[in-house]
Image: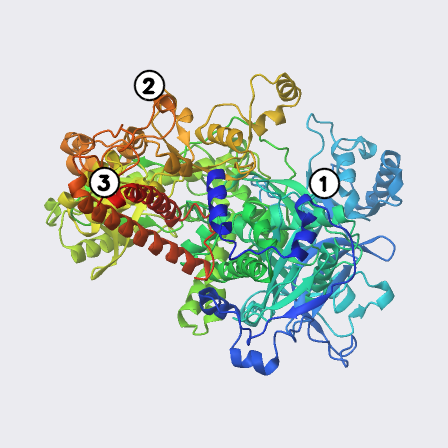
Amino acid sequence: MPGAVKRVLAEATSTRTNVQTSPRSAKKLKLDHGATRNGRPPVKVVNGSFNSSQPKSRFEEDVLEKLTQDMGTLKENNAEKDQQWHRPPVDPDFNEVSHKLCFQQIDIEEGVLNGGKATVKLFGVTENGHSVLMHVTDFLHYFYVAAPLNFQKSDCGPYKNYLENQCQKAFSSYGAVISSVQMTMRENIYRYQGNEKSPYLKISVTSPKIVNLVRKQVEGGNANYKQMWPNTEGGILTFDNVQYVMRFMIDNKISGMSWVEAPAGKYRSLAPRDRHSNCQIEARINFADLIAHQAVGEWAKMAPLRILSFDIECAGRKGIFPDAKMDPVIQIANYVTRFGEDKAFVRNVFTLDSCNPIAATQILSFEHESQMLMKWRDFLEEVDPDVIIGYNIANFDFPYLLERAKTLGVDRFPYWSRLRNVQSKAESSNFSSKQMGNRDTKTTNTNGRLQLDLLQLVQRDHQLRSYTLNAVSAHFLKEQKEDVHHSMITELFNGDGDSRRRLAVYCLKDAYLPQRLLDKLMGLLNYTEMARVTGVSFNLLLSRGQQVKFLSQLFRKALEHQLVIPDLPNQGGSDDQYEGATVIEPRRGYYKMPIATLDFASLYPSIMQAHNLCYTTWLTKEMVEKRNMKKDEDYIVTPHGDLFCTTKVRKGLLSQIFEELLAARKQAKRELAVETDPFKKAVLNGRQLALKVSANSVYGLTGATNGKLPCLAIASSTTSYGRQMIERTKAEVEKKYTIANGYDNDAEVIYGDTDSVMVKFGTDDLRKSMELGQEAADFVSGKFIKPIKLEFEKVYYPYLLINKKRYAGLLYTDPNKWDKMDTKGIETVRRDNCRLVQTVIETSLRMLLIDKDEEGAQKFVKETISDLLQNKIDMSNLVITKALTKGVENPDDKDEKDAKDKNPKNAKNVYTARQAHVELAERMKKRDAGSAPGLGDRVAYVIIKGAGGAKNYEKSEDPLFVLENNLPIDTKYYLDNQLAKPLGRIFEPVLGEKKASQLLTGAHTRSIIVAAPTMGGLMKFAKKTQTCMGCKKPMISALEKEGAVCENCRPRIGEFYVKTLTKVSELEVRFARLWTQCQRCQGSVHCEVICASKDCPIFYMRMKARKDVEDAGKELVRFDRDAALW
């Protein structure tokens, strides 16, 4: 990276045609040292002009055209000058007595009102786009404890007083603690209770902040009234431990992102002096008067939410990643849309110093950074976004802005939220889930405003080779962008108005692309539907894993059935394990006939439904004996040996949840099939996907021993039934579809995995195979209890079965046309493989499966290996990238070792094993510390030839350093460590082990070309001598050594000159084509190329082409010495 940065920067600044340093900017650019100070108000606002004499770039024509509204409308409305930032005003006739207040709540949090009284704050937006804050009052938090024997209703009052006294002794600073103690009949959800309710005490507290303190008093036996509760080792069990806001949502049937209504006359608007927020409407209502609308029918609509997408640029010091304590924010680009509208109504760029106009974009120019930041904060408050999006805003933009304002002493800046007196603060946090793993991140509160970081959204939902904005945009939007490295930004900013305009266009596109990605991936819509389906608030979906979604649904259903959920101790340290799903041993091979795939629909949910597996139906042997229950009539024994009662005795709560989810999904799919409105279709599709994910997540949580409500009996019984069903499906299919039963061939199940089986019916007829697949699915479904259903969905033809969970095939759902090439477990997106692996594997599979050309696939692989060994593969295909996420351990640093020993967390922050990308980063730092990759950067490297026995981490090198010094690539490493295994896995089932191994040996591997290095190894001691361009004779004499040819070849000098000239011309054309392509991508053919996107294959091609032109030019110069002689 550093070499790249230096050379690309040199390209960008060598002529200085695009970056001119004016005296004014030179004087101002003490910014390089982070020196800024408060100054006068902004000196001017520069508005974009369509009559600008500046030539319009392709970027403006092709991309900014998409950013803008219709040009005629812009001119007519003077949109650049008159962009309306503020929301539409509230109707002056609106009042609380005669008008109901209906809004979509988007954010919900705990708060206080009237001197500390607990409330729930609902932030939202009305159908007309007015912002709302509703304070919901008088909802008390509570929990349950089982009433002891002999406890009577008359004991509730004395027990309340006793509990209050005990709490006052333990924590007296809260005033009155206990609001009420009521006896009520409830049933424990955990295990079958004989369908009998028992007395429980509902303990309500005056403030949600103290509920856990009271709970601990009860659990610890410190409030054991008259010693009525027996003393047990684990303490007294309490029930319904749920967070206050979720308790409020559950009890009042409010789902995340749903609509709520405050009836006319039931709410009270707050006087201006009593307001907490800058919302247009702020009111209070008693929780009992609030109406919650279920998100179906007309209430499935969305409010016109305002979405702000923004990006910042910082002027860092040379070679150092920007530091908020030193380096200024120089530009902030903003792009504001309304949900459901295609066009933005605000597009602007806040910039330091002058900036030339940009079409249809408002430019706000400032002399002082502090003034720019405050103006942006005012803009944020005025435009009042409901959702703030961007790319990596959580870990960079938000924290940087806050830290920068703190450094400058801009005290009013951090007030970004809708609450007037609440500052936004960036705090370190940790997100952990089975799906995402363990991630350290930063969270910034923007109370009342949602946040969606598109980087985190894409990382959560998609597996990609690279997660840079450029790579993600190329993948989803099929659109590249100029990628300006942070080290070049200061150079552009130090120029003139035109170079700052170029930077502003780059910044604006970085604000525009997240909005495009949000629309393309339907992120806001899908998360909204997930919040509505599961009942969880939007923000919790992003900050928590799967468990919170299931618990929300479970608590809601438990409330309906008057069930209470025990607060079980965490079992995270439990060693209990259960056997997972069955995988039928694959019959590896390349199948040139159709392979039908039979899939169980929602396998685990349907098993739990069919066999009534639930917390509420789980039995013990003692219960069975005590209640004299009959096997198979009153209860069943699962294959794992667990006992559950049948639906005759009690229908499980989980079964009811599944039924409702699946019924709702069917309804959504029915509506989707007939809906014509694109927006409503998107909502319905998001809803049915959310319902599917929600149903499938339940099983996993029953087996999570570190979860809130684990039950291994359910999890292990479910997987045991699944294993049994896969084996039975195999047996039934192979038993029925035989020649003996009148079929043309004997069917064979060649593979089975968790919830699907692959069947070879023996026919070459694709249509016939599909018919048999459907018939087999219907036949086997009849053997199982409803709602278990085996479905036929697809056929693979041909099918390459490599191993367990590794296969590829051409997928058909229609016999007339294939749908796609489907692969699983094959190296195509792993970033620790070079791009060559992906290219070779994908092309080979395409030739095998689509073209059905085995010979062609072998020929292609052999030619690629030959090109690799002859140094003909472009560098971009050999680059491996890895993130530098930790520091490097120095074994000689005693202080570092002591720090690690004292605090084990420090050990996580350093690499203990030597790794290729880490070692390279250290070497690059020694060469040029200013341009070396830093923590958090992705390090690109290739493996070069090293001394005998050298480790791979010693042979890693910067690709640009390799190109510049002509270092030889270690082709054996790429053949043996990158290509060999993936190729073997694909071709062994097709060709057999022996023939497949010949792809890596043979005549095509005997011609090897190694680049002659210009440095390193023996080259340190070698003296380079020019050779004749004709006969290659060393040119030693003083007369010859500066020329191109020796005395003997001088008669042919014209021929050699023409050859060299032709070579130079061809290389110049190649370089010019690549250069032009990069200029088009960056948006202007008038500017130097400064793009440093190492994810782009053209980057290394361009650098190599440049080096080739320089080297060929040196050869041509040698003819100057001989020019006079011919």
Residue situated in front as seen by the camera: 21 or 1002: 21
Q: Mark 1 points at which residue?
A: 145
CA gap between label 1 and label 2 equals: 72 Å
At which x and y percent is residue 207? 80, 48
Q: Residues within 10 Å of mark 3 (few under 14, many from 20)?
A: some
Drawn side of residue 500 relative to residue 682, left or right: right
The kind of secondary structure element at disc 1 is strand
CA gap between label 1 and label 3 equals: 71 Å
The answer to whether marks 2 and 3 mark residues whose Cβ atoms lie closer than 8 Å is no
The kind of secondary structure element at disc 2 is loop
CA gap between label 2 and label 3 equals: 26 Å
Residue situated in front as seen by the camera: 806 or 942: 942
Residue situated in front as seen by the camera: 363 or 116: 363
Mark 3 residue type: Thr
> How is the protein colored in the picture?
rainbow
Drawn side of residue 998 relative to residue 365, left or right: left
Q: Residue at x 82, y 44 (%)?
A: 156
Q: Name the residue under label 3.
A: 864
Mark 1 residue type: Val
Q: Residues within 10 Å of mark 1 (few under 14, many from 20)?
A: many
The answer to whether marks 1 and 3 mark residues whose Cβ atoms lie closer than 8 Å is no
Q: Residue 948 carries which label?
A: 2
Q: Earlier in the sequence, mark 1 or mark 3?
A: 1
Q: Which of marks 2 and 3 is nearer the N terminus?
A: 3
Give the vertical position of 1001 relative to 1121 (above or below).
Answer: above
User: In the figure, residue 441 lies in which quadrant?
Assistant: top right
Q: Residues within 10 Å of mark 2 (few under 14, many from 20)?
A: few
The kind of secondary structure element at disc 3 is helix
